[in-house]
Amino acid sequence: MIALVFRKSSEAAIAKDSSARAGKRKKAERFVLAALSSIPGSAVCSALASLDAETDQGYVNELQQQWLDEHRRKLEELGVPSRT
């Protein structure tokens, strides 16, 4: 049982570490694209940077909407009137 707990915690630590590295890599990519987009005539780099940012924002918006829907449902179950 201790081995199972240790394995799960080490798997979580590995996932967190790879997620942190992915976040740092993403920031570096955005920085490079922003730097390249400052060069005259490099509209493609600017467009790629904007597309990437919009994709990430769409994901965040979707998560926020799911959170709102879930909590709206919980409030309705408790009988709290909706403001909308």
Image (tube, rainbow, N blue to C red):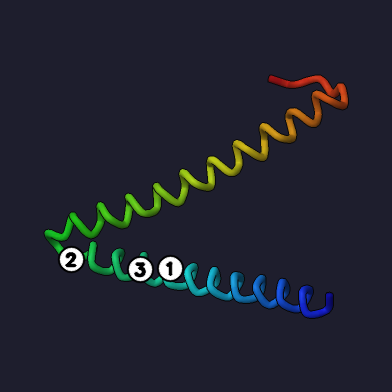
Name which residue lies at 68% across and 19% down. 84
User: Local crowd at mark 3 within 10 Å, few (<14), some, or many (≥20)?
Assistant: some
What x and y, as percent, mark residue 77? 83, 25
Q: Determine whether the residue tagged by mark 2 lies in a helix, strand or loop.
A: loop
What x and y, as percent, mark residue 14? 60, 76
In the image, residue 34 sits, relative to residue 79, either above or below, namely below
User: Local crowd at mark 2 within 10 Å, few (<14), some, or many (≥20)?
Assistant: few
**Is 59 left or right of 47, judged from the image as shown?**
right
Which of 34/55 is in front?
Answer: 55
Which of 73/31 is in front?
Answer: 73
Which of 7/63 is in front?
Answer: 7
The image quadrant that residue 74 belongs to is: top right
How far apart marks 2 and 3 lie (CA) works out to 16 Å
Q: Which residue is mark 2?
A: 39
How far apart marks 3 and 1 lie (CA) works out to 5 Å
How far apart marks 1 and 2 lie (CA) works out to 19 Å
**Residue 29: image tag:** 3
Q: Which residue is mark 1?
A: 27
What x and y, as percent, mark residue 48? 27, 55
Quadrant in the picture for the N terminus: bottom right
**Residue 7: image tag:** none
**Is 3 left or right of 11, judged from the image as shown?**
right
Name which residue lies at 45% across and 51% down. 56
Q: Determine whether the residue tagged by mark 3 lies in a helix, strand or loop.
A: helix
Contact (CB < 8 A) between labels 3 and 1? yes
**Is 2 left or right of 83, judged from the image as shown?**
right
**Is 71 left or right of 47, judged from the image as shown?**
right
Q: In the image, what residue type sits under mark 3? A: Glu
Q: In the image, what residue type sits under mark 2? A: Ile
N-terminal label among 1 and 2: 1
Q: In the image, what residue type sits under mark 1? A: Lys
N-terminal label among 2 and 3: 3
